[in-house]
Image (cartoon, helix red, strand yellow):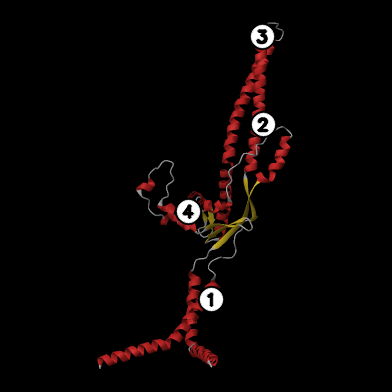
């Protein structure tokens, strides 16, 4: 008996739910004109919003960060080892992780330098810096006395700089695809040509930044070896000249003093020659080290001038407004009886209080 009662109750609840849903659908169908009117209004609003939104174009570039050190290390070391040269590849060179490239592009120093890029604007009809393109000089905010003062080597971000950096914040973006091991640079600008110019400048600037970081250590070592090499070469040339002059002046002499002086010059000559050859070898090693350490951004998809705008997506905006309008229209139709009952109840209560 209990099972039959439970089954009967479930069937009644199911039937009542179906009846309520049917009633709601009937109510919506009866109010379809109102729903349609709201959708039409929403379509007009969505079309207006899509028309007044400024156009934006995306210039993209896909690159793969590489370093020639790992690729050619064994080959070069094996070749020069035949000449008795030790390249010293056991010395670790500080590597810059591609995960930090995004922080570099988003840094203040990188963006301030990028703002000095010269771009051609068809809209403005001439060349100008990216800073002037984003915020014209007529809109330049006034600088305070602190911003105009000299602060030595410290970098001061003025109000104008800050406004330009904010304008550039969401226009230059670098993302990494760890699965593919590539980096994608996206530059968004109101003009397609400007977007392409800024993207190309950003890639070249990023290449220079990571190159300076990677080769800083080996480049300083190259400079040091180059200076020692120049000193050893000058010393060798000086000893070589003095030795030749002494031998010419004492060609037929039999004096022991002259022979002793010549032996000293010969020893000094051999020492200077060995040092000169050793530093020449080290200089070549240092030059190879710089080339082997230099990172390379291999371009997979080069920058091109976009022909299709990325924003606004008018059809998506209009469709979104249409869906919102349909939802609002259905809500109004379904809530009409509830609102009417509430208003009627309030009116009756007011009438009773007054009477």
* Residue 167, image x, y percentages: 47, 58
Q: Earlier in the sequence, mark 4 or mark 2?
A: 4
Residue that label 2 marks:
281
Q: Earlier in the sequence, mark 1 or mark 4?
A: 4
Q: Tell me the distance, in whole angstroms, between the alpha carbons under discs 3 and 4.
A: 75 Å
Residue that label 3 marks:
258
State the quadrant of the N terminus: bottom right
Q: Nearer the viewer, mark 3 or mark 1?
A: 3
- Quadrant in the picture for residue 73: top right
Residue that label 4 marks:
131
| Camera sees residue 40 | no
Q: Nearer the viewer, mark 4 or mark 2?
A: 2
The secondary element bearing badge 4 is classed as helix
Q: Tell me the distance, in whole angstroms, between the alpha carbons under discs 3 and 1.
A: 103 Å
- Residues at badges 3 and 4 in contact (C-beta under 8 Å)? no
The secondary element bearing badge 2 is classed as helix
Q: Tell me the distance, in whole angstroms, between the alpha carbons under discs 1 and 4.
A: 36 Å
Q: Earlier in the sequence, mark 3 or mark 1?
A: 3
């Amino acid at each position: 008996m209990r099972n039959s009662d439970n089954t009967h109750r479930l069937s009644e609840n199911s039937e009542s739910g179906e009846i309520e849903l049917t009633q709601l659908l009937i109510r919506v169908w009866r109010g379809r004109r109102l729903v349609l009117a709201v959708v039409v209004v929403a379509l007009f609003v969505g079309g207006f919003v899509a028309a007044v939104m400024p156009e934006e174009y995306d210039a993209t570039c896909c690159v793969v960060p590489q370093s020639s050190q790992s690729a050619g290390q064994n080959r070069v070391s094996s070749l020069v080892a035949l000449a008795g040269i030790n390249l010293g590849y056991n010395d670790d060179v500080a590597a810059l992780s591609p995960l930090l490239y995004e922080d570099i592009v988003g840094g203040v120093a990188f963006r301030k330098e990028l703002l000095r890029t010269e771009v051609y604007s068809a809209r403005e009809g001439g060349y100008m810096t990216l800073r002037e393109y984003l915020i014209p000089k007529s809109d330049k905010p006034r600088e305070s006395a602190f911003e105009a003062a000299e602060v030595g080597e410290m970098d001061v971000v003025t109000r104008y700089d800050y406004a330009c950096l904010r304008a550039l914040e969401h226009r230059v973006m670098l993302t990494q695809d760890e699965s593919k091991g590539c980096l994608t640079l996206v530059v968004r600008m109101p003009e397609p040509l400007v977007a392409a110019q800024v993207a190309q400048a950003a890639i070249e600037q990023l290449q220079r930044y990571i190159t300076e970081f990677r080769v800083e250590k080996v480049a300083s070592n190259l400079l040091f070896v180059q200076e020692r090499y120049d000193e050893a070469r000058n010393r060798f040339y000086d000893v070589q000249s003095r030795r030749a002059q002494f031998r010419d002046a004492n060609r037929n002499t039999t004096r022991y003093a002259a022979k002793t002086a010549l032996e000293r010059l010969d020893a000094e000559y051999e020492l200077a020659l060995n040092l000169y050859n050793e530093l020449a070898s080290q200089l070549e090693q240092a030059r190879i080290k710089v080339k082997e350490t230099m990172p390379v951004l291999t371009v997979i998809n080069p920058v091109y001038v976009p022909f299709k705008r990325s924003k606004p997506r008018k059809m998506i905006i209009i469709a979104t407004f249409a869906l919102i309008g349909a939802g609002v229209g259905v809500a109004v139709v379904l809530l009409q009886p509830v609102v009417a009952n509430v208003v009627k109840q309030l009116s009756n209560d007011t009438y009773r209080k007054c009477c």
